[in-house]
Amino acid sequence: MFMNKFIASLGVAAHIGLSVTQVMAQDKKMNVLFIAVDDLKPVLGCYGDKLVKTPNIDRLAKRGTIFTQSYCQQAVCGPTRASLLTGLRPDNTKVWDLKTRMRDVNPDIISLPQYLIDQGFTTQGIGKIYDSRCVDKDLDAPSWSVPYYKNSDDYFAESTGKPEAGYQKLETKELAKKYRAEGESKGLKGSELTEYIQKFVRPSVECVDVPDNAYNDGSNALFAKDILAKLAKEEKPFFFAVGFSKPHLPFVAPKKYWDMYKREEMPVAPFQQKAKNSPDLAYHRASELYAYSDIPSIASFSDQKGGGLDLPLDKQKELIHGYYASTSYTDAQIGILLNALDSLGLSKNTVIVLWGDHGWHLGDHNLWCKHTNFEQATRAPLLISAPWIKPSATNSQVEFIDIFPTVCDLAGVTVPGHLDGNSLVPLMKNPRSKVKEYSVSQFPRSYNAMETERLGYSLGEFMGYSIRTERYRYTVWTKNNFRSTQPFNSDLIIATEMYDYRKDPNETVNVVDEKKYSSASKELNNKMIHFLKTQEKIK
């Protein structure tokens, strides 16, 4: 068995360019607790938010490094998680949507936990780590040394039982059961059945006085605590991935977390318009939020603008209240994990990585949800704690593709040579240093055939590439289904954006064509072209 495992290790090593000596090198390895939080933006105490209550994440920040300028590669669940977990940009994973399965289009791809298995780790996971639509039914079987943990009835509150369609309010659960039976009578199953139920029963918020483990995240936190106790007894180092779904929509959380905040104090976005001179391609109509059953009727009372989703002030405040409550709820579950690490004596030899998969629009630019290249969608929290590195915060640019090599570096294994990112350990040791000039995000857009014909494009598929430097964001929108792995020429660019965060943190004006920014615009354009051509060359 050892020989079979060794041969398998050499197979992975050959693919990523490691030598036999490197594979056999046995440095002291550290455990890794890998915490993913869905739709978590940097609305956290440790990121300077004075209203939110996140004592446990803040506690983790005090023992680790806060990366204040951390950016995802694409602001939507499936692509950003595929990119982060493989250390490759979306144009290399070939996952740009929520239906492409990562290994179908890239069968030789190697994930972080998969690589760690071949370095002698046990890798286990629970909750949302990958987006289930972008991997196999086993939530990416090659990534895990034991079958992925699913929700267990044993950990839900006896007083409530499991949620129905994600909800615990009795009226909502009864309606969901009704439409489930109705859908089943029509022969619907799986995702089709779920979609049928959600057409009728899918409120955007829920506030009910129930225990934390009435919902999936609370149940999984208790399950994860017990898994940690088992891992503590194993001889192998572990990589344990724990994913939390909130604050993803719907904003459901036990009442006590809603009670932490006052509705009237909710911070409504100060700028709720399209940025001056900005292209339509930069925006969307918040279709994710619009899919919730209480939103269409509310929106129908408003005069909808050209982009985004107009909502009455009271609904905006309710949604923001729900986002804050859901964030505090997840923070409490993270506290269970941190307490477990401490009580089990694991804190001294465990690296902790906490990340939100992308940001979230809370009404800025009249936008809700993610799905853009703007700051509120692409910037996401990243905290990394290594027991031997003193706490700090760094303002240097980092990207999610940097997490794979950083975990390897901290865990005591060789960093593979094929990754697109860089180890962030130099920043953890010296917060004023830099590992890159800028971060890059991207997002696709589509027009229907009629709109494509009207605009005169041969294809209605567009991609926006966005560079974020310390001061600026520079975005180009390209036509004809262009990807950075293809030959680039400037004729592909149909729109350009540039925002100055020093003078305009809310992105109210696209200054790319303003005379006083001509020098900066030219410099950023050169950086963008260099980036795109570099991506082409290395393929």
Image: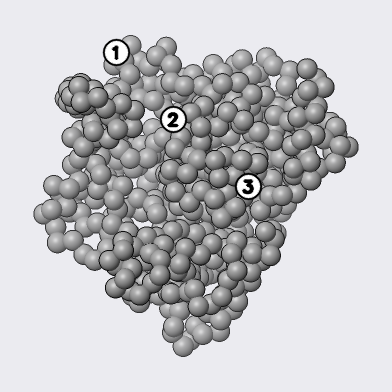
Query: Disc count in the image?
Result: 3
Residue 403 visible, this orientation: no
User: Which percent across, then down, holds residue 39?
Assistant: 42, 44
Q: Nearer the viewer, mark 1 or mark 2?
A: 1
Q: Which residue is mark 1?
A: 159
Instruction: Give the spatial CA distance, label 3 vs label 2.
Output: 29 Å
Q: Left or right? Give the position of 379 relative to 197.
A: right
User: Could you tell me which secondary element the residue under label 3 belongs to?
Assistant: loop
Q: Which residue is mark 3?
A: 87
Q: Which residue is mark 2?
A: 332
Residue nearest the observer in this picture, 387 or 200: 200
- Mark 3 and mark 2 lie on one chain; the one further toward the N terminus is 3
Residue 251 visible, this orientation: yes
Residue nearest the observer in this picture, 445 or 371: 445
User: Which percent across, then down, holds residue 248?
Assistant: 37, 40
Q: Residues within 10 Å of mark 2 (few under 14, many from 20)?
A: many
User: Could you tell me which secondary element the residue under label 2 belongs to?
Assistant: helix
Q: Which amino acid type corresponds to the residue marked 1 in the rendered image?
A: Ser
Instruction: Give the spatial CA distance, label 1 vs label 3.
Output: 43 Å
